Image (tube, grey):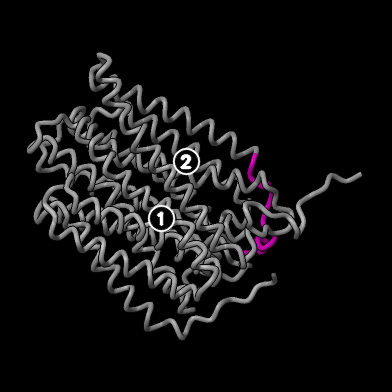
């Protein structure tokens, strides 16, 4: 007697799943959403501790150094994002996801050995090589696992898990260096212990995902006769569709927003805490993390709303709403000088809503517009656009942080979000959803 498989009637948290997708597959998918952001937020947030306490980088150069590390990490993602998407159409999403987590673990572990900028850069590049794979897989897996009518809610849950992962990073993981230092460890030992523990956790997650994700190829991944380069080019060619092009631009904004907050807010908090409040770097990072929790709570609470909105109204309209919120939230920081002020708390609420909202609505839009046969290639290019956004945020934001003001990176991406918002209004009548079998 054959083992029963998931059918058209299988549901998970109210979501309609595609054939042969199980509830266990969905649990594994949401583990990716939770853990990938948790580790990424930790890497960016804990970096000021390494720059100050381990490498001894002068404070006036830390913005540029942080931006430079993120820049080269994004170069890796740009070079590999489309390749991962196309490769997943050939060998399956599970293999690419597990490879990504193993590479992330290696990068995290190497952070603990960093004694100079070169070692730190190599660690960041290895981490980026793994994170690139996960960026390419998340939206592809949503499209593979959830039926089109449920993808807004499925992506909304993705945002919830992102928010929970980010909260664990700032409430627990970012406090580890200060915790170990307080127990008598020198900064070098505290850093090594912290990164080794987290690397071990990531390895365990990779094993759980190998067991939990759906094996084999998706039903839409059957054009093996093409080479990877040909498949990657399909992602760029798909931008002729105005909906795909808009989703690519929105991903640029969404990932750039994430980079601005993750890279520069904790750095700003650490520098301000040291210069104005007499805190150590570890204490400043912990205090900044407590403020970031407000942003992540806003993300957590609004993610289901944006997911439902994406299933209830035109998906371009839903994206426009999040871009406008981002414009207001990020540009409002122009008037803020204290990262620990009430004004910053209010801005962080809007920023948190915009971050998760733009990620969700752009992801649902690209899943709607991507032809099933080249879904991995299109979503790989979508991820590449996000990498370019982070690249731009890292370099331009780092320069603005050091040479203009601490909120310069925030203001920059608020203006970018405003421009893409205007573009979304212009192209909305031209966006025709790709029709796939329900």
Position of the N terminus by quadrant: top right
Question: Magenta residues, as a range?
Answer: 212-226
Is 297 in front, or is 45?
A: 297
Up/down of 344 relative to 238, above or below: above
Which residue reaches farthest top? 184
Residue tagged 2: 35
- What secondary structure predominates along the stretch shown in magenta? loop
- Tell me the residue at 63%/57% (across/down): 15
Residue 321 in which image quadrant: bottom left
- Tell me the residue at 41%/41% (across/down): 38
Position of the C terminus by quadrant: bottom right
Is 64 in front, or is 197?
A: 197
- Tell me the residue at 23%/36% (across/down): 287
| x then y, percent, for residue 339 | 17, 47
Which residue reaches farthest front? 342
Residue 424 in which image quadrant: bottom left
Is residue 282 visible in this depiction of the protein?
A: yes
Q: Which mark is residue 411?
A: none
Residue 208 in which image quadrant: top right
Is 139 in front, or is 94?
A: 139
Up/down of 276 relative to 156, above or below: above
In space, the residues marked 2 and 1 are separated at their CA atoms by 24 Å
| x then y, percent, for residue 435 | 63, 76
Residue tagged 1: 79
Mark 2 or mark 1: whose residue is earlier in sequence = 2
- Tell me the residue at 45%/75% (across/down): 316
Q: Please indicate whether residue 360 sits to the left or right of residue 327 in the image.
A: right
Q: Please indicate whether residue 155 sits to the left or right of residue 436 in the image.
A: left
């Amino acid at each position: 007697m054959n083992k029963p498989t998931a059918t058209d009637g299988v549901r998970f948290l109210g979501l309609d799943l595609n054939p042969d997708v199980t509830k266990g597959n969905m649990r594994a998918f949401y583990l990716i959403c939770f853990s990938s952001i948790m580790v990424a937020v930790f890497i960016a947030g804990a970096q000021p501790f390494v720059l100050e306490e381990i490498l001894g980088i002068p404070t006036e150069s830390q913005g540029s150094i942080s931006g430079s590390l993120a820049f080269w990490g994004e170069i890796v993602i740009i070079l590999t994002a489309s390749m991962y998407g196309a490769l997943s159409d050939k060998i399956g999403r599970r293999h690419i996801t597990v490879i990504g987590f193993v590479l992330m673990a290696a990068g995290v572990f190497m952070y603990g050995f960093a004694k100079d900028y070169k070692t730190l850069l190599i660690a960041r590049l290895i981490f980026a090589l793994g994170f690139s794979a996960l960026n390419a897989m998340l939206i592809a897996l949503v499209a593979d696992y959830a039926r089109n009518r449920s993808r807004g809610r499925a992506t909304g849950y993705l945002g919830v898990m992102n928010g929970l992962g980010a909260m664990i990073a700032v409430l627990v993981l970012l406090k580890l260096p200060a915790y170990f230092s307080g127990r008598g460890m020198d900064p070098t030992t505290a850093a090594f212990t912290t990164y080794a523990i987290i690397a071990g956790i990531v390895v365990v997650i990779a094993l759980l995902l190998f067991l939990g994700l759906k094996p084999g190829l998706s039903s839409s991944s059957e054009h093996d006769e093409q080479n990877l380069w040909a498949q990657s080019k399909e992602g760029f060619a798909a931008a002729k569709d105005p909906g795909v092009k808009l989703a690519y631009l929105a991903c640029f904004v969404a990932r750039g927003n994430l980079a601005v907050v993750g890279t520069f807010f904790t750095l700003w908090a650490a520098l301000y805490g040291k210069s104005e409040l007499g805190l150590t770097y570890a204490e400043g990072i912990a205090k900044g993390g407590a403020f970031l929790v407000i942003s992540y709570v806003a993300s957590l609470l609004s993610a289901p709303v944006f997911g439902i909105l994406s299933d209830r109204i035109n998906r371009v309209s839903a994206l426009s709403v999040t871009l406008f919120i981002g414009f207001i939230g990020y540009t409002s920081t122009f008037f803020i000088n204290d990262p620990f002020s009430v004004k910053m708390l209010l801005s962080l609420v809007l920023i948190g809503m915009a971050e998760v909202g733009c990620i969700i609505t752009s992801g649902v839009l690209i899943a709607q517009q991507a032809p099933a046969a080249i879904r991995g290639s299109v979503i790989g290019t979508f991820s590449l656009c996000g990498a370019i956004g982070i690249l731009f945020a890292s370099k331009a934001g780092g320069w603005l942080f050091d040479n203009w003001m601490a909120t310069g990176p925030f203001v920059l991406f608020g203006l970018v979000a405003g421009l893409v918002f205007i573009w979304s209004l212009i192209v909305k009548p031209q966006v025709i959803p790709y029709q796939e079998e329900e």
